[in-house]
Image (cartoon, grey):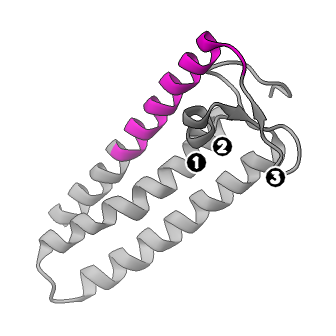
Amino acid sequence: MTDRYVPGTCNIGPDEIAMRRRFGHAGVAATAALAAALLRSDAHPAWRLTLALPAAGAAAGYLQARHRFCAAFGFRGVYNFDRLGHEQAVTGDDAQLQDRRQARRIVAQSAAIGLGVALVAMAV
C-alpha cells in the first residue's frame, strides 16, 4: 500500500479507503434488501433492473477501496492522505489526465457490475 499520491494509481489514504469500504458494505446490504423485496413481491421482473443502482454503488465503494483511488477525487483533481475532508489539489495537467482516466475506468466497471447484477436478478 502506498502512502502518497501517485497519478492515476493512488489518490486516497487509509481513512478514505475505510470510508469507501463501508460504502461498499452499505451498498451490498441495500442491494440484498431490495432484491429480497422484489423477489418476494408480485412486481414485474423488469423492476429488478433497479438493483443496478445499489449494486453499482457497492461495486464503486469496493473498487475504490481496492484500487486506493477515489473516482470523484479523480474528476475533481484532488487527493487526500490526511483526515477526511482535507483534500489537496493535484498539480500538473498530465497527473489530472491520468486521474480522470482512472476515474472513468472505475465508473465504467461499477456500472457494468451493477447492470450485471440486475440482469442476473431478472433471469431468476
Q: Is residue 56 magenta?
A: no
Rendering quarter of residue 33: bottom left
Residue, x 41% and y 59% (percent of image)? 55
- On screen, residue 117 above or below 34: above
Q: What residue type is labelled 1?
A: Tyr
User: Badge 3, how many Cα within 10 Å: few under 14, some, many 20+?
Assistant: few
Q: Name the residue under label 2.
A: 65
Residue, x 50% and y 64% (percent of image)? 28
Residue, x 56% and y 17% (percent of image)? 98
Segment tinted magenta in the rendering: 91-111
Residue 116 left/right relative to 21: left
Residue 62 disc label: 1
- Marks 1 and 3, how far apart at CA: 18 Å
Which one is in front in this view, the residue at disc 3 or the one at disc 2?
A: 3
Number of numbered tags placed on the structure image: 3
Instruction: Tell me the SS state at disc 3.
Output: loop
Q: Earlier in the sequence, mark 3 or mark 2?
A: 2
Residue 54, percent from left and from top = 42, 64
Q: Name the residue under label 3.
A: 84
Instruction: Tell me the SS state at disc 1.
Output: helix
Q: Is disc 1 in contact with disc 2, using a CB cutoff of under 8 Å?
A: yes
- On screen, residue 16 above or below 80: below
User: Badge 1, how many Cα within 10 Å: few under 14, some, many 20+?
Assistant: many
- Marks 1 and 2, how far apart at CA: 5 Å
